[in-house]
Image (cartoon, grey):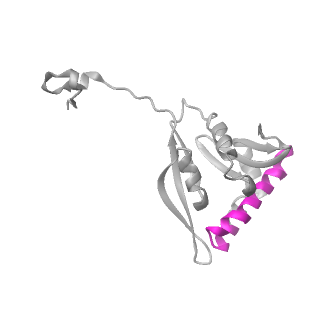
Amino acid sequence: MEIKYYCNDYFNGIYEVIHKTIEEIYPKYYPRSAVDFFHNHHSKENIEKQLPNEYMMVLMENNEIIGTGTLFENEIKRFFILPIYQGKGYGKLLLKELEKNIDLEKHNKLRLDSSLGAVKFYEKCGYIYEKYMTIDLPDGNKLCYLEMYKNININYKINLEKWEWTNGDKSRGESKIIE
């Protein structure tokens, strides 16, 4: 298994991974109109338009693309692993590689939109539910997804000047914040 940076030779393989995964997994969670929405959202034209501003990686097994993920500023996008490779730790490895490339000087959180089928995966990787979202579809159905985030640049700083020990007993560790 290898993780590689995107190059133009990978475009068609990435497109196939995305659409095969959508077609095999998404109908378990969404009506057909939502599946079609995802296919359109991840069209070749949309991907090509976004590529110049994104950081994309591919996951390969025996020179075959089996997964892909993209980082744009602090957002994970287009993260797909072929269904036959899901549940084997490959997605977690690819996600960690993408996460390593965030600019910690600019961002302290990673963000992503999770399809309903991927929520548990992202939770296991440390992402937290932030907001439930819907998109109205032309046939009256709704496409539902979750906005999720992960804190990545947490610097714990305690201002000891704002603390005082209660009862004068530091050994017991009792304290309170002085307002």
Q: At which x and y percent is residue 172?
A: 21, 25
Looking at the image, residue 157 lies above or below residue 110: above
Q: Residue at x 56, y 55 (%)?
A: 119
Q: Is residue 27 inside the magenta stretch? A: yes
Q: Is residue 171 left or right of residue 73?
A: left
**Outermost residue toward the left?**
167
Q: Is residue 120 left or right of residue 27?
A: left
Question: Which one is in front, 23 or 107?
Answer: 23
Question: Which one is in front, 49 or 93?
Answer: 93
Picture mark count: 0
Q: Is residue 150 left or right of residue 88?
A: left
Highlighted magenta segment, given as a residue range: 9-36
**Outermost residue toward the bottom?**
139
Looking at the image, residue 151 lies above or below residue 66: above
Quarter holding the C terminus? top left
User: Looking at the rendering, which quadrant does residue 166 occupy?
Assistant: top left
Q: Residue at x 22, y 21 (%)?
A: 171
User: Looking at the rendering, which quadrant does residue 139 occupy?
Assistant: bottom right
Q: At which x and y percent is residue 13?
A: 83, 51
Quarter holding the N terminus? top right
Q: At which x and y percent is residue 145?
A: 55, 61
Question: Which one is in front, 166 or 48?
Answer: 166
Res. 40 visible in picture: no
Res. 152 visible in picture: yes
Q: Is residue 106 inside the magenta stretch? A: no
Name the magenta segment's main secondary structure.
helix
Question: Which one is in front, 22 or 37?
Answer: 22
Q: At which x and y percent is residue 157?
A: 37, 26
Q: Is residue 108 left or right of residue 49?
A: left
Q: Residue at x 74, y 46 (%)?
A: 51
